[in-house]
Amino acid sequence: MHASAPASAPSSLMAEAYLELGFSHILQGWDHLLFLICLMALARMPKKIFWAVTGFTIGHSFTLAAASLKILTLPVIYVETLISLSIILVCVELLHTGRKTLARTYPVLISLFFGLVHGLGFANELISIGFPEDGLVAALLFFILGVVAGQLAFVVPLMLLGFAARRFIGSSGKLYEGLGYKFIFFTIGFIACYWFVERSLQF
């Protein structure tokens, strides 16, 4: 169960509560985490991963703020369906190995675009929790910082694990194009397809 900040909570308690909410939300959001895994596989190289994750952060922060401030609204089920679709599309790109596409060359474009969609999902969670009466902007800022912290807590160990695997198992390109690689993204794609159908049926 998520923590929540009382409407009149002191600023330090409010900051801690919304940081925790943002941190736990992304780490409990399997659709967001699977997208990050796919995004990192698409980027591959450390510099591209950095920019891809940065683009994702910029994208989701923008729509998270816009939706939380009621500048932009979209029904929850549409947002969740689009999030599952974002995972499917990146999996399709990953499974078409050997192609030098725009998405592979500039994964930051993909991350920025789909980050806008995922930000709406973060906003739905935040809106359902609510804001303190006199600290909407501060609560929003700390929630975003919590999301970013949770994102880093997931991405950095995964990057280190990936680099260790390349070093000790093999660094050739065949490692990424083998059956294990395809199985991982077939599985993620299948899960995302299931979510997409399940959510679409709720329209």
Image (tube, rainbow, N blue to C red):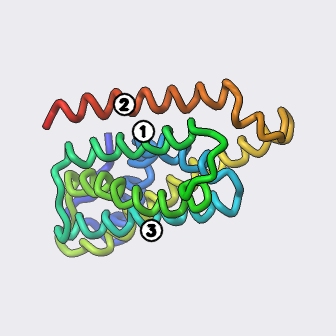
Residue 33 in sight from this viewpoint: no
Q: Which mark is residue 193?
A: 2
Where does the image place residue 171, in percent across and percent down from the top left?
83, 41
Horizontal and vertical percent for residue 184?
58, 29
- The part of the image, by quadrant, that contains residue 195 is top left
Question: Upstream in the sequence, badge 2 or badge 1?
Answer: 1
The amino acid marked with disc number 2 is Cys
- Is the residue under label 1 in contact with that under label 2 (CB below 8 Å)? yes
- The residue to which callout 1 is attached is 88
> Going 45% across and 65% down the picture, which residue do you hit?
145
In the image: residue 193, left or right of residue 168? left
Circle 3 residue: 58
In x, y percent, where is residue 69? 21, 70
The one nearer the camera, 66 or 175, is: 175
Task: Report the Cα–Cα distance between label 3 and label 2.
Answer: 26 Å
Q: Nearer the viewer, mark 3 or mark 2?
A: 2
Foreground pick, 167 / 14? 167
Tell me which residue sits at (85%, 41%) in the image: 167
User: What secondary structure is found at the residue carrying circle 3?
Assistant: helix
Characterize the local packing of mark 3: few (<14), some (14-19) or many (20 or more) Cα atoms within 10 angstroms: some
Alpha carbon of mark 1 to alpha carbon of mark 3: how far?
Answer: 21 Å
